[in-house]
Amino acid sequence: MSQRTPFYITTPIYYVNDKPHIGHCYTTTVADAIARFHRLAGRDVFFLTGTDEHGQKVEKSAAAAGATPQQLADENAAVFERAMRLIGASNDDFIRTTQARHERQVQAAVSRLIASGDIYLGTFEGWYDEGQEEYVTENAAREKNYTAFNGKPLVRAKEENYYFRLSKWQPELEKFLAANPHFVKPAARMNEVLGRLRQGLQDVPISRTNFSWGIPILDAPGGAPGRHVIYVWIDALLNYTTAIGAIDRLCGKEPSGAEDRSAYWPADVHLIGKEILWFHAVIWPALLMALGLETPHCVYAHSFWISEGQKMSKTLGNFIDLATLEAYIDRFGLDALRWYLLTQGPLRETDADFSYAKFVEVYNADLANGIGNCASRVGNMIEKYFDGRVPPAPQTAVFRFPPGSPPPSAIQVQPQDVAASLETVFDWPRDVREFVHKAEKQFRAVDVAGALLEGIALVGRVDAFINLTAPFKLAKTIEANPGAKDQLAAILYCCAEAVRVASLLLAPAMPAKMSQLWKTWNCAPAGGVPLHKVGEFGGPHALRPGGTIAKGEPLFVRADAKEPAPRPPESV
Ligand code: MSP
């Protein structure tokens, strides 16, 4: 691993008995934007996603499809990998729980916990509904008069299972959560966890014997696989450590491969949906404590997408599926879809609605009329008035309106358009530093929308500056007033340089479009230079006066809300 500070971010691993949809794509896109931001900020990032491939549901779906579970898993894992490519995920690895590297380490972890007494063999006895293949609580059994769902009597059944001694970790967990109030985010989710924790923890069964599609526990004589397979959730949670060889390392095995990734542990952010919070906020840290591994820094649980005002469900058939997302990508481009997901998505406590009307509104406001229009406005004026060459940078990039008693360093520009009676100061180096600083802070706090909107706000500031200084009017006065050319140069240099920095803040969401801009403006950021340096207005990485700025294709073409919503070809 390099000298740079590591940053490790994960998504849930997705079940292969489902097809990818907006929910999976959303979590991965958010994690991707955060990963890209931290790379830009100069950190050594490891970004993990993958698929969860064991369990009874997969076994049953495979049987229904006339395939083996492994065949189904192979097929659907490939579909998920393609989905991740489609949305532009820059993950560093894709873990599958049927991979040997994962299975070997999960078995080692469970054996270790059996040896330490944290996992023990116990017996469960209760009322069993044979038709439904499930246990019924004593109360429910009494209420149903000990009758099963299919009308037959419930039977008394007994099962031997391995249990994780979760109850033992209650005091440690309480201490841990009290000492780390930001471990679970957003705050409302932390309160949910604390509330449920107060009700007390019970040991949890972590093995199954009624199906075989799972990782066998090595509990037969001589450490051979026995008849118990590991409960899919224990298997799945461990992926965050097995992918980087942290269990191998724990067991004193040299991780294979040139790179020792185990140093990425503990994870900085586990990004998940709110429905799987309990596993990540309680069971996972307890397992790690039992294993003697460090706990992650943060579990961030986002809310859910709904579709055109309704919950997405199989019965309603209203999932925003991959084909629909592809139709949006075909019409608006990938970066526009990412922008919508990232800025309008359910990152915080409330669910978010995926609506076509809103998509068009946001697309036009932020992209077509926002960064797209601003970049082409500035580019066109530089093309027109400076032959497509970056104009000379002004001595000072501080502008004061209206010119009253400016400090010696401020440029005085007569407002051309607005009868500005209010005093306004554009101190570009200071203002840009503030935008960058705020965006960095928000990205670090997983406030992705907040961070990205700083980029758009910076674009808005450039637009306001253009409106106030009206360079196109100033240009008409050049012949009569020789000083006007210098003023025009100062204005356009500042606009272009501010747009360059805005593009850096927007790049985690829109890597392709911002690269397109960097190409036409010859300003791709140098790799490995931290954001606060490469994003310094007028600093060593600023636009070079004399460098070319080509006109280029428009970044975003305005959308018409009257056009029907994009639909996958087969459903048109
Ligand atoms: N395999 C488990 C996770 C194991 S992690 C150790 C699982 N898989 S899943 O395929 O059901 O994916 C669930 C995740 O997909 C959610 O936690 C969330 O990240 C994402 N989403 C699924 N539906 C969603 C929405 N409607 N909206 C937003 N994201 C949601 O659970």
Image (spheres, rainbow, N blue to C red):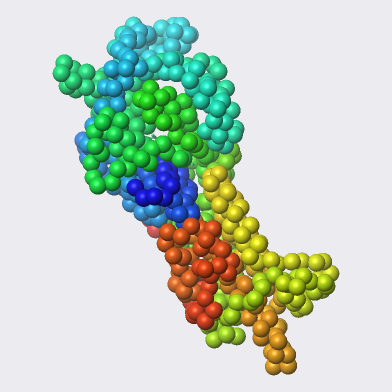
Name the residue at the bottom extreme.
479
Does residue 568 appear in this view?
A: no
Residue at the location (60% across, 32% down)? 188
Q: Quadrant of the C terminus?
A: bottom left
Give the answer, above or below, for where 379 lies relative to 351: below
**The one of 136 and 102 positioned closer to us in this rendering:** 102
Q: Tell me: 133 left or right of 316.
A: left
Residue at the location (30% across, 12% down)? 121
* Numbered marks: total: 0
Give the answer, above or below, for where 476 lies relative to 232: below
**The one of 389 and 4 positioned closer to us in this rendering:** 4
Give the answer, above or below, for where 177 lies relative to 461: above
Residue at the location (48% across, 29% down)? 281
Examine the image and state in which quarter residue 210 appears.
top left
**The one of 162 and 223 positioned closer to us in this rendering:** 223
Residue at the location (70% across, 85% down)? 484
Examine the image and state in which quarter residue 295 appears.
top left
Q: Give the x, y percent position of residue 459.
A: 61, 65
Q: Give the x, y percent position of residue 283.
A: 43, 25
Give the answer, above or below, for where 473 lies relative to 46: below
**The one of 205 and 437 positioned closer to us in this rendering:** 437
Q: Tell me: 96 left or right of 317.
A: left
Which quarter holds ligand 1? top left
Q: Give the x, y percent position of residue 83.
A: 36, 50
Does residue 217 appear in this view?
A: yes
Q: Give the x, y percent position of residue 551.
A: 51, 79
